[in-house]
Amino acid sequence: MSATLLIQNLSTRCGKPKTDTREKESARKMASGHTTAASVRGPRFAGAGRRGALLLALLLAAAAALLPVAEPSCPRDNSVVKDINKMHQSNYGIGGFSHITVAGALAHGMKEVEVWLQTISAGQRTPIHRHSCEEVFVVLKGRGTLLLGSTSLPYPGTPQEIPVFQNSTFTVPVNDPHQVWNSDEHEDLQVLVIISRPPVKIFLYEDWSMPHTAAKLKFPFVWDEDCLDAPKDEL
């Protein structure tokens, strides 16, 4: 074999392994480089994520602090002296009617009695209703008519019409269906109402011929709904 051929054979046999070794070394370095870069980027990205979440939480808290806070319709007030002018007043969806709970079981912690200030516009009436508590009215201004139904019949029937006037007082017997009507055409009727056994449970009638057994219980009543959750039906 010539010297030239021998050199070519040796070059072919020895050169390939050297090339494979260099390629493997290059691949190893590249993989190592990618791993190092990933390990560097990982903590940076994780840190940025935590900072972003913290910033978002701070922004949400700041936005919530700037939102207007609605005045509660059932504020708790245990002060000894209260200003009626500053108490919550609403018609609670009853047309021509205004109600203020002056001293209540839910808003003020009353145990035995509750006091309301109610104003009825000219020509307006309260719903026909009954309740299992004593009720006393003091007429502060205006005049009107108390309509008082029967409990001896299966339904209230034709009510008695009893006139009331400023500085008069009247009581409604327990569970008697009744209605207060401002029969004056011009002036408001304003009454102070005292009830026992609060909070009140009221049975509503659609008219004077509705059977007592068909009257619908409304509890909590409209002015107590923001203070007391309605009972849930149990299966």
Image: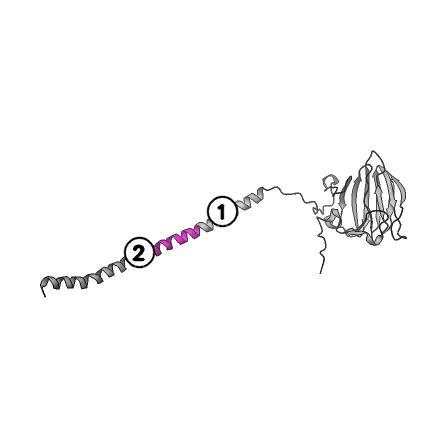
Q: Which mark is residue 55?
A: 1
> Going by the picture, which residue comes out furthest to the top?
186
Residue 43 lies in magenta, yes or no? yes
* Above or below 216: residue 187: above
Query: How many labels were placed on the picture?
Result: 2
* Amino acid on which disc 2 is placed: Met
User: Could you tell which of marks 2 and 1 lies nearer the N-terminus?
Assistant: 2
Secondary structure beneath disc 1? helix
Q: Few, some or many C-alpha atoms within 10 Å of disc 2 (few <14, some 14-19, many ≥20)?
A: few
Residue 113 located left or right of residue 49: right
Quarter in which the N terminus is drawn: bottom left
Residue 219: x, y in percent? 76, 52
Residue 97: x, y in percent? 78, 40
The segment highlighted magenta reads 28-47
Secondary structure beneath disc 2? helix
Q: Which mark is residue 172?
A: none
* Amino acid on which disc 1 is placed: Leu
Residue name at image x 47 percent, y 48 percent: 52
